[in-house]
Image (cartoon, grey):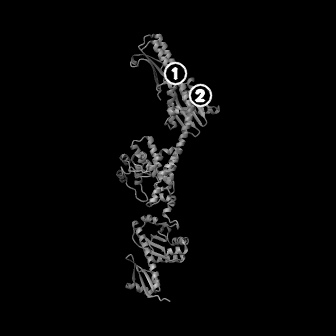
Amino acid sequence: MKITSLNIIDRELHNFLQDFVFSISLITESKSCILHVTNNVIDVKYIFGENDTNIQNALCISSKQRKHINCVLYIEGPQNINPKLHIHIKRELELVRKFIEIKLQLFFRQKWQNRYYFLETCSKNRESIDEIFKLSLEFINKFIDIDLQAIYYSDNKGIISYASYNNDKELLENFITNIHNSLKHNNLTSLYKRIANYYIYARQSGDYFLCLFFKEDIHPIYFLAISFFVNELLWLTASIKWHQREKDVFKSLIKSFVASLEAKDLYTRGHSEGVAYYSRHIGKALGLSELDQKVLHQAALLHDIGKVGIPDYVLLKPKKLTKKEFKIIKLHPIIGEELTAKIKDLSEIALIVRHHHERWDGLGYPDRLKGEDIPFFSRIIAVADAFDAMINKRIYRQAKKKEIALKELAQNAGTQFDPNIIEKAINSLEKIDVYSPQKNSFIPEHVEIARKEFFYRDMLTGCKNAISLSLDSRNMNIDAQFVFFDIRNFQQLNLIYGFMQADKILVKFYNLLCNFFDEDNIYRIGADEFVIVLLTVKKAGEITDIVKKIEKNLGVEINLNIFFEEFSPQNVNSLINKFKLKKYYLSQLSGCFNVFSQLYNSVAIFDNDLKLVYKKKVNPLMLSRIKQEKDKLHPITKYGQIIGYVYYEDPCTKN
């Protein structure tokens, strides 16, 4: 702070100094008279007469030199001055200096008492107690002519802060112990005494203890101001500690927000921190101030917080979203804005969060903002978000190399991203390491697995589903054996017994399968369709025996298909389709059998592999002969393709 007018401090003093300069000019009959009041914090001039262009040639009279206030009088071209008048002016000037000094001390005391001068002027943007004490040490020595050597502070929690001009900390701590005891035994709140070469002023206020060490005795003029200063310092210290606690709570709140998102989707763990990490580096490359970088980092940390309001079946879906589901996921920036806007300290990032999915070409969401209408910080986060997503593995794709990700960023400049940001962003991202989470998730892995069972488990039976089969097949041996089961004429069971009873049959069917096969290798892939992957191959006869036992227990017939085919994760779906097609053909053959059995006495239906499917009044010897004489079989076609064969003889005799 530089005081350039005493008018703001004391009107009476200001008028007095104007009159003083005028009277000196009259007494000395000079062309001009200048009073210059100065030190490190004050610089005031009072001029009467002509301009001060020739001040170097003027007569100079100064007061006694002091650290706090100096007064210099410049008299140009004096007509009436003698040694006695010179001495008289010098004495008057010293009185003026003391008068200014007293007025300033009263002003400072009043400012401290009002509790805003020190806080707003000197401690602005100071966050550390140690920093405040260092500032206070300089402050009191600058504004008052006292040699303050050290400040010591402690509280009941063992927090100690110390600022000093010397290295006598150990000696001063011994004095502090003495002072502590004196305050305690004499039941005092403050104490001023001399110990060794120091004058010590101490104040005890509740749990706080503050001690000031002076090299010289405090003049009575300054003592009241010092007392106010100590009160202010204690109050300020308590305020800073409270502010620090608020900041810690606020930081914890942000961490909890991010953790809640991690709890929602463990697969993207570290994504928010990664986006914040890259955003801050990009912001630094763009020349943002430290404060703006903090705001950007905070917004990036919380950019996806709105996903806590997205249903799990959409957020965690391992396959491509439907149009309806994508509309739901596009709501997360709006939800994020609502969440952050409700918290006072986060309200400034609410719009940044809302618009982090906007595109430079206007094709983004939720508001389809275009170009520079998109908040600047949102444009930065959009780049960092895309980069982090590309270089990390997702359930639907592998991670991309850093070089490829940077190339894609460049390719999308001017469409998806702000072209003015991309160049510096790429330069910055090239130089820094890829972010990796510093610690493991607080969510146990088995909890995450259980939470995603919605997608990987059948809700009726608890069996693994087709998505699980597709994922598990990536780690299967190519010699695995696929066994397909389904309940014959399951639709008729639904019609006869109703859906609830049919569902009970399905659950019982699955439980029976678990008695014979490892449940981790059983998958429900359709309404009544199950596939079992046998890593240790069984003979067809063994599986047939198992089927007979299940049919006997279940009271229904089961279709069985066994595939011994070399497979890869890519052809698992083709195997499933092959099975479903075979099942469809089987249902068509069943319809054919119903028709032929009404027309003929003896009927046999075979699939296209000549495996007997249905028969009516055909003895085993005849079946064996029929297979050898294939020309006696009539093909059954569907859409021009042979799906089976039928043998029949003698029309039915109607009664």
Whether residue 367 is visible, yes or no, is yes
- Please say if 62 is above or below 394: above
Image: 230 above or below 251:
above
Secondary structure beneath label 2? strand
Pointer 1 local density, CA inside 10 Å: few below 14, some 14–19, many at least 20? some
Q: Amino acid at mark 1?
A: Leu
Where is residue 216? Give x, y as percent: 54, 25
Q: Identify the residue shown where x is 45% and y is 76%.
A: 587
- Residues 212 and 487: in front is 487
Please state which amino acid type lies under the numbered disc 2. Answer: Tyr
Nearest to the observer: residue 494 or residue 80: 494
Tell whether label 1 touches label 2 (CB within 8 Å): no
User: Is residue 174 placed above or below 46 in the rendered structure?
Assistant: below
| Residue position marked by numbered label 2 in the rendering | 192
On the image, the x and y values in percent for residue 128 come to 51, 38
To which quarter of the image does residue 280 belong?
A: top left
Q: Between disc 2 and disc 1, whose residue precedes? A: 1
Circle 2 residues within 10 Å: few <14, some 14–19, many ≥20: some
Residue designated by label 1: 13
Compared across the picture, whether 18 is left or right of 425 comes to: right
As displayed, is residue 651 above or below residue 533?
below
